[in-house]
Amino acid sequence: MNETDAGRKGRLLIIGGAENRTCGAGPLETFAELAGGEDARIVVITTATEVPEEVAEEYTAVFGRLGVPSVRELRLLGRRAADDPATLRALDTATGVLFSGGDQSRLRTLVGSRTNELLKRRLEQEGLVIAGTSAGATAMGHWMILGGGGHEVAASSVKVGPGLSLLDNVLIDMHFNERGRLPRLLSGIALETRLLGVGIDEDTAICVGDGQFTVVGTGVVTVVDAGQCTVAYPASDDEPMAMLDVSLHLLPAGCTFQMNDRLPAIGTMRGPKGD
Amino acid sequence: MNETDAGRKGRLLIIGGAENRTCGAGPLETFAELAGGEDARIVVITTATEVPEEVAEEYTAVFGRLGVPSVRELRLLGRRAADDPATLRALDTATGVLFSGGDQSRLRTLVGSRTNELLKRRLEQEGLVIAGTSAGATAMGHWMILGGGGHEVAASSVKVGPGLSLLDNVLIDMHFNERGRLPRLLSGIALETRLLGVGIDEDTAICVGDGQFTVVGTGVVTVVDAGQCTVAYPASDDEPMAMLDVSLHLLPAGCTFQMNDRLPAIGTMRGPKGD
């Protein structure tokens, strides 16, 4: 770590998957810039994917095109690797860490590991920039969505488990509108209404820092706030739940959201109705 | 009309399509009961469908099983038929009228016709029960959704046109969660935020009367209330809109909704969270 980084809060970039990797625009460009541009040292954690060589090669090429020469892969296929001092040394000098997509169940091996602890500490105290896309996105939360689906809001429509806790009090879902996942996210939120639901479209991200996030990319971020919600649970996990007074926000690029006050705002490039 | 019906408000039963027609349960049973059971005189309007004989035959069989002997089809394939005194006479003695599914564009020929006027008058003053399923459901509103789709909330995601105005101030969509139509309904509501959005699942209905509706059937009714919403319109109809503070309610069977106060309530068979 640089001396100048001490005490500096980092940034989280949570990407809904399928981000543009062909040109220099979008969430990956934002990540490369935040991580230091030409001076960035990026680590790509490929634990989630079953094709790590391919994924690492592709990201190395993209970041190369974006002017970042230093990209390293960490595969971390078990707790031993995630607790290994060599792993921690590699992460200690990174300015940016990207969790690839794949199957988020494979990321459970990292939860609570020394890698997890180091990332959280460096994010909160040393200005580290951490990105996650698709499977790597939902793993950022205190809980992560492991699976589920269907068109009904029901307890059986979602499966959750502990996440990396890099961002507390949220439940993240991805490939969101493309795969019609509002019922799955609402099902998770209905089971823990204090969590804020954040559904991120493909090629879209939230950039989190200083208690708020900003939306970047070509799609929309859907926020589900059940803080004032009444939920009625049916006898069976397969039956639909009743949910009253869920607050819903659809936020395209430029929109912001204050996490503590749960307050959305429209981006400066857009006027309110009638402007 | 019976003398005893004078001044009595009717009921609307708005069905999300694919209602159970094989046994005696669900929305069609509710309709047959409301229309008078054994004493009902039901007219099925098959204007929306391209296979009217088949549809009429199927409903005749269902209502027969439900104990209604009197079922008549009206095909009404143009404005002349919809204004024909013989048509009006047939509708004047009906206790229940059902609009079949099909393509709602075909129902435009009825909008503003003498049939339309008669149905509205008898609904409001003579206790007539009117049901519509699928295409026949969305046609009930002041505006009806004619088409559209996709996963984005954008002006280009929905096409609307004038409806039969049997229920004012709502925009109805159907096959709702089965076909992932929340983006389409939100797109329509974003363009006219005073309308209440009502998305009705298959084999599910709202029964409207006395300023409120009750949900019946096996699925969920999704209510979108944009009364407190802020909308930001992008430059292009294809780009996603920003929508802040949309209120969302998911209402399974037994739930009620007060139309004027826009107030949802959980059905008596369900307790709130913690009960």
Image (cartoon, coloured by chain):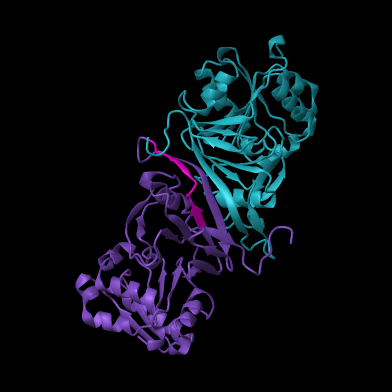
Chain colours: A cyan, B purple
Does the magenta-highlighted stretch encompass residue B97? no
Residue at image x 71%, y 24%?
A: A124
Q: Residue furthest top?
A: A3
Q: Is residue B90 above or below residue A185?
A: below
Q: Residue at x 63, y 55 (%)?
A: A157
Q: Nearer the viewer, residue A103 or B27?
A: B27
For the record, the magenta segment spans B223-234
Report whether residue A151 is seen. Answer: no
Q: Position of residue B121 (x, y in %)?
A: 33, 74
Which residue sits furthest front?
A: B7
Relative vertical location of residue B67 with respect to residue B188 in this rendering, above or below: below
**Left/right of residue A8 with respect to residue B217 in the rendered view:** right
Point out the image quarter for the N terminus of chain B. Answer: bottom left
Q: Residue at x 75, y 36 (%)?
A: A111
Q: Quadrant of the C terminus of chain B?
A: bottom right
Image coords of residue B135 (percent x, y)? 38, 65
Left or right: B176 in relation to A154 = left
The residue shown at (65%, 62%) is A238
Q: Is residue B224 magenta?
A: yes
Q: Nearer the viewer, residue B258 or A216?
A: B258
Q: Position of residue B154 (x, y in %)?
A: 40, 44
Instruction: Specify whether residue A166 is in view.
Output: yes
Above or below residue B233? Residue B246 is: below
Q: Position of residue B222 (x, y in %)?
A: 52, 58
Displayed quadrant of residue A196: top right
A16 left or right of A117 in image: left
